[in-house]
Amino acid sequence: MTRNAKRYCGAKKRQGEGDCTRPAGWGTDHPGFGRCKLHGGCAPGPRIVALNEQAAYELARLDVPPVVDALSELARLAGQAVAWKDNMSAKVNELSSLRYESQTGGEQLRAEIALWERALDRCIATLTAMAKLNIEERLAGVRKQTADMMERALDAALEASGAPLDGKAKAREAFKRNLKIVA
């Protein structure tokens, strides 16, 4: 659901007819999405629903290019997973209690705890995949292959230009120096 499609809380009112016309997420930590604070928007269930709506909205706005280098993308994803875990860890550290009592008298685990636990699981899965795939060694191999391919292309270009032999050697050395600087 897009942000514009649901601008209001929309919960059924107890008195009178109609729906709540307060802005979606009014008085909560998820403004613009989900129920207002007077209609349960701060409770864990509706809060998670609203946060999922917000995430779906943000994802739909992205212009996603295709993945060309899966190894580098996995390394980047692992960095994001660790950053998210750290962010959730900070949120958990801010809590005064890990549980709260629901209206029916039962104890409930806070949503922040569930998100932190999921973040831990995702970090473990991503970092384990990186370790199993030996990402660093593979990326180094890809970089070496790319450099070799560029050297062969330079050699072919120098041959086609008809440059003198000593000029070719100087060009190759300058190319290798600059390639190392860039790497």
Image (cartoon, rainbow, N blue to C red):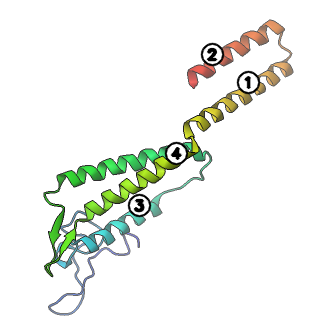
Tell which circle, 3 or 2, labels the residue nearer the N-terminal end: 3
Disc marking residue 130: 4
Disc marking residue 151: 1
Badge 2 amino acid: Arg
Tell which circle, 2 or 4, labels the residue nearer the N-terminal end: 4
**Which SS class for mark 1?**
helix
Tell which circle, 3 or 1, labels the residue nearer the N-terminal end: 3
**Residue 50, located in which quarter of the rendered image?**
bottom left
CA gap between label 4 and label 3 equals: 27 Å
Tell which circle, 1 or 2, labels the residue nearer the N-terminal end: 1
Q: In this rendering, is residue 22 above or below 139?
A: below
Badge 4 amino acid: Met
Query: Residue under circle 2?
Result: 177
Q: In this rendering, is residue 160 above or below 38?
A: above
Location of the C terminus by quadrant is top right
Location of the N terminus by quadrant is bottom left
Q: Is there CB contact under 8 Å for labels 3 and 2?
A: no
